[in-house]
Amino acid sequence: MAKQADSDFLTMTGLDDQLSFSYVVEVTGREPLPPMRLTQTENRIDFGSANVSISLENREIGVKILVGTNGKSIQETYRETAKLFYTGADRKRYVFSDDPKVYWQMSLSEIEIDEEVNNFATIDLTYDAYPLSVDTEEVTVTGTNFIKFYNSGTYPSNGELSFTNNSTSAKVISITITDQLSKVVLKADTAAELTGNWVINMQDRTVFKNGALAMQYIDQYASQWVADETDKFYIPADKEVQYNIPLSTTEIQNAKVTYRRRWL
């Protein structure tokens, strides 16, 4: 039979290049969990009406594939397919054709192969996966001295907030998120030190000015962005988000937030 690449999953693992026929029969374990949000006052997660404290556990994602064995024995097929799918302990990014806009980070934990019937065999793969699926492409939202958008992901995201400051008088710039406790405060002895192109990396909690690390301009006493879930400087899930830069629209240019949505 002709080779068939049913899923991006097969292409990314290389299986469709090495077997005469391959077809993804079933994928399990990707079902969405209940919508969640972090409360503003407590480090807890709200599932509907009841607040509960939880930690996110890895998912178990199963993939069942029908393959052509090219007349090889079941032992040969097992050895060849095991080499194709095993990627070590490090999780790799996988995309499934029925949901190509997101990727999953997974590593193979188990492989089983059924008995060969008429040169075909069924492979059952079990993956240890991070609980979140993530956008394959970044989302970019632009603004002026404020950036407003709706994050449709069901789990908070990290990203980058960037802007150009042309103010000739501002020695302090306090960047806040509406309805959130978190804020990042830039402070310098002179206004000239704060002019330039700024990037705030929410994932690494780092700040750059004109491409160079500039952590010396973070007012660590006034800022609230790293302590716990209540004041992290990130992108809240499943809600409208607004970042505020308290300068005029002539002083702030090129303001934008770049991020990837995440789903639990």
Image (cartoon, grey):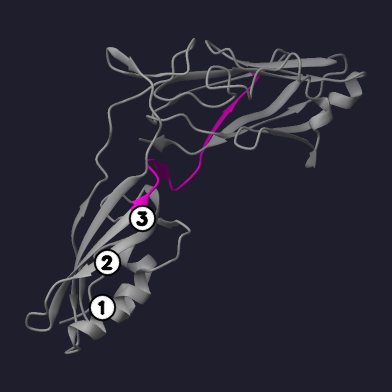
Residue labelled with disc 3: 95
Residue labelled with disc 1: 78
Q: Quadrant of residue 130?
A: top left
Q: Quadrant of residue 211?
A: top right
- Residue 142 sits inside the magenta stretch: yes
Q: Residue at x 37, y 76 (%)?
A: 83
Residue labelled with disc 2: 111
Badge 3 crowding class, 10 Å Cα cut-off, few under 14, some 14 to 19, many 20 or more, is: many
Q: Which mark is residue 19?
A: none
Q: Secondary structure at mark 3?
A: loop
Q: Mark 1 or 2 closer to N-term? A: 1
Looking at the rendered image, the disc whose residue lies closer to the viewer, 3 or 2, is 2
Q: Mark 3 or 1 closer to N-term? A: 1
Q: Secondary structure at mark 2?
A: strand
The residues tagged by marks 1 and 2 sit, at their Cα atoms, a distance apart of 9 Å
On screen, residue 153 versus residue 256, left or right, reads: left
Kindly identify the amino acid type of the residue bearing the numbered disc 2: Ile
Q: Position of residue 146 (x, y in %)?
A: 61, 18
In the rendered picture of this protein, how many numbered marks are placed on residues? 3
Tell me the quadrant of the picture where the C terminus can be found.
Answer: top left
Quick check: marks 1 and 2 in contact, CB under 8 Å? yes
Q: Position of residue 246 (x, y in %)?
A: 70, 12
Q: Mark 3 or 2 closer to N-term? A: 3
The residues tagged by marks 3 and 1 sit, at their Cα atoms, a distance apart of 23 Å
Badge 2 crowding class, 10 Å Cα cut-off, few under 14, some 14 to 19, many 20 or more, is: some
Kindly identify the amino acid type of the residue bearing the numbered disc 1: Tyr
Q: Position of residue 199 (x, y in %)?
A: 70, 34
Q: Which residues are magenta?
A: 128-145
As displayed, is residue 194 above or below residue 75?
above
- Residue 178 sits inside the magenta stretch: no
